[in-house]
Amino acid sequence: MFLNNPGADENTPREADSGYAVSFYVIGHGGCFGDVGHCDIPEGARAPFDRRSPHPLTPQKRTVVVTEALKRLRETADSDLTVTVVPVASESPVNAEEDLLNFEQLALITYD
């Protein structure tokens, strides 16, 4: 994740001068090799005492702490902030590049 570097990509150095803030990781699912319906996400509510992990294709929430990167920007940046998330996939024949990462919401929460 880069701050105030909208042109960042997988080749951008992970350094403060490049706007690098933090990395986070998502273990992807890749292609489905099971029978028909094997990778379908179950619909409906889960039982209250179901302790299993969510289905691996269920959307995930991530909290990423960028405090130090924001502190560095505080002295040099204006009031605008650009967040660039650069997805990098491992080499795999089943990666679907266009669907690596989708956001429904991105929030920046700060405290004094």
Image (cartoon, grey):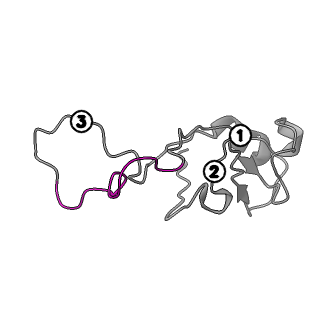
Residue 55: where, in percent of width, then height?
33, 46
C-alpha separation, residue under disc 3 versus residue under disc 1 = 29 Å
What's the amino acid at mark 1? Answer: Glu
Q: Nearer the viewer, residue 96 or 110?
A: 96
Q: Residues within 10 Å of mark 1 (few under 14, many from 20)?
A: few
C-alpha separation, residue under disc 2 versus residue under disc 1 = 8 Å
Of labels 2 and 3, earlier in sequence is 3
Does the magenta-highlighted stretch encompass residue 7? Answer: no
Q: Nearer the viewer, residue 108 or 26?
A: 26
Secondary element at image label 1 = loop
The image quadrant of residue 100 is bottom right
Secondary element at image label 3 = loop
Disc on res. 52: 3
Q: Is residue 99 shown above or below 53?
A: below
Q: Which residue is mark 2?
A: 95
Of labels 3 and 1, earlier in sequence is 3
Q: Nearer the viewer, residue 80 or 38?
A: 38
Q: Are marks 2 and 1 in contact (CB under 8 Å)?
A: yes
Q: Nearer the viewer, residue 79 or 95?
A: 95
What's the amino acid at mark 2? Answer: Asn
Magenta span: 31-45
Q: Which residue is mark 1?
A: 91
Does the magenta-highlighted stretch encompass residue 42? Answer: yes
Residue at figure coordinates x 56%, y 41% from the top left:
64
Secondary element at image label 2 = loop
